[in-house]
Amino acid sequence: MQTLGDLIGKPLFTKAGERVGTVKNGLLSKNLKALRAFEYFDEQEDEHVLPVRNVLSAEDALFVRLSSPTPPKDVRPAPFGIPVYTQAGEILGNVCDFLLEGYAVQTLRLTGGKEIPVECVAGIGDALIARKAAPPRARAAERAQPKAAPAKAGSRLLTGKRAPANVCDARGNVIVKKDTLITAEVLRRAAAHNKLFELTLSVLSSR
């Protein structure tokens, strides 16, 4: 295994030995579970994207193929430095690296020596929300729950509090008004519009 941090700053060479640039960062899938591409800058300091399928080997340097790759979609720059909170609002630290097995992300390493499995990432925006790792039986039970169950995520953190700001859907319609008392129904409505994380983050930020 290696970390994404191990790869940042490494030189990129073609199979013929021509240096083409230096790794700047990694591009991860939206759920952070896979490394999809590298951001790199060339010798003129122009920035480019290289999908991992174009990497021939990655050790002391990356040997790559530059055959007009199609940039991957639905990716995000590796969020180094982002703060990590539990669903109860406890700060765990900041992301400092990503442990890889091949190009699959296994673990997020945090400041202070803490680590969280990538499966525990519950949401990510300006901050990352992590849930506690469940024992195997609990995970099986969660899979058996109806799809509406995720609306309960963070309910202990939010229920009984008031929304510090309006939360709007993708069209700009207000779905949770400022100062609304947060109930299970409010949580379900926010989840239905994919706004539960935004609501959670706004409550955390207002504390």
Image (spheres, helix red, strand yellow):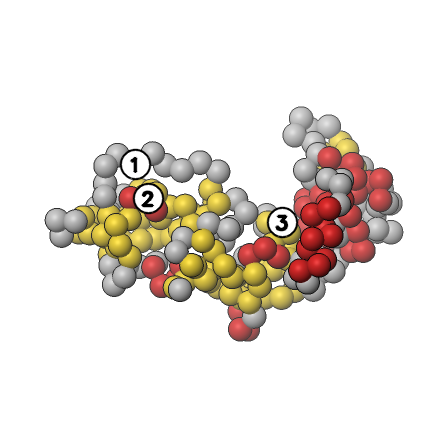
Confirm whether residue 51 shows in the render: yes
Could you tell me which quadrant the C terminus lies in? bottom right
Q: Nearer the viewer, residue 184 or 59?
A: 59
The residue singled out by tag 3 in the image is 123
> Along the polypeptide, which appears first: circle 1 or circle 2?
2
**Do the CB atoms of the residues marked 1 and 2 lie less than 8 Å apart?**
yes
Q: How many marks?
A: 3
Q: Position of residue 103 (x, y in %)?
A: 40, 53
Q: Which residue is mark 1?
A: 69
Q: Residues within 10 Å of mark 2 (few under 14, many from 20)?
A: few
- Going by the numbered disc 1, the residue's amino acid type is Pro
Q: Position of residue 22 (x, y in %)?
A: 27, 53
Whole-percent x, y for residue 123 in the image: 62, 49
| Tag of residue 53 | 2
How far apart in space, not on screen, are marks 1 and 2 (Cα)? 9 Å
Q: Amino acid at mark 3?
A: Gly
Amino acid type for the residue under numbered disc 2: Arg
The quadrant of the image that shows the N terminus is bottom left
